Image (cartoon, helix red, strand yellow):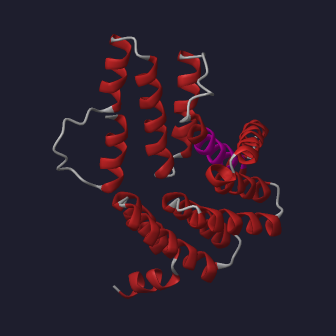
Amino acid sequence: MAHLNVCSYLSGRTNVEVDVKSFDELTSIAEKINSASLLWQTFVNQMALNFWMRDYKNVVKLSEKYSEEHPSSQQKHSLYVFRTLFEGVAYLNLARDTKQAKWKILGEKAVTWMSQLESMSKWNFENKSKLLQAELHYLEGDLESAEAFYKASIKSAHEHKFIHEEALACELYGIFCIENHVADEGTKQLHIALDKYKQWGAMKKADQLQLFIDLVNPTYFGRLKLV
């Protein structure tokens, strides 16, 4: 149900023909029946929803709350890789935005852990590892390396058929380009990401990204001035 909650939200569907519980309801049920598995899956899916909508502060807030309330780690769980990806991107973005060293330290830990996973399964983890490394290089001001790793992540995700993670890499690369005054390439990458999100079925995410594209598009501002 937690996974369906995320899917229905990102797709923008409201006419799902099953009883979709809220995250609070799922957490309450999990606590009532003492299900560590349901608590964990609800947490990861709630984190996923905030991550895909780029609410990185809430990603970190959820992670900290879960760790405090449930200190026994589930690192061996298959979903832990997604927690690492979500946290890693969030930490490194917060490090750039706030200049606080603690976020970089946490981000570096995520990069290291994902790199270890990549050494075990290039197919499953290469694109995720390259993306986190791109974000770290960006944070450190090594723009040439950052660009190379963004492109490597996009290529890997495409070759391994992870369309949603290809969209993510294109989105983050597009933002990187725009923030570093390469607007044409940035806009191009954002439109590729937009198309990939639509193919994935995440229409609400696509709508959010379209709003961002409009905001960074000079033509859009020109149209506003003419109205």
Q: Is residue 152 left or right of residue 48?
A: right
Q: Position of residue 84 (x, y in %)?
A: 63, 39
**Total numbered badges shown on the rendered structure:** 0
- Quadrant for the N terminus, please: top left
- Quadrant for the C terminus, please: bottom left
Q: Is residue 92 magenta?
A: yes
Q: Is residue 199 left or right of residue 164?
A: left
Residue 143 vs 115, above or below: the answer is below
Q: Position of residue 221 (x, y in %)?
A: 46, 80
Q: Give the residue drawn at x 19%, y 47%.
A: 16
Magenta span dominant secondary structure: helix
Q: Position of residue 219 (x, y in %)?
A: 48, 85
Residue 8 vs 223, above or below: the answer is above
Quarter of the rendering containing residue 183: bottom right
Q: Give the residue drawn at x 71%, y 56%.
A: 130
Q: Which residues are magenta?
A: 84-95
Q: Is residue 95 left or right of residue 204?
A: right
Q: Is residue 45 magenta?
A: no
Residue situated in front as seen by the camera: 77 or 53: 77
Q: Give the residue drawn at x 44%, y 30%.
A: 41
Return the residue found at the far bottom.
226
Residue 85 vs 37, above or below: the answer is below
Q: Give the residue drawn at x 55%, y 35%.
A: 78
Residue situated in front as seen by the camera: 92 or 224: 92
Q: Is residue 106 left or right of residue 7?
A: right
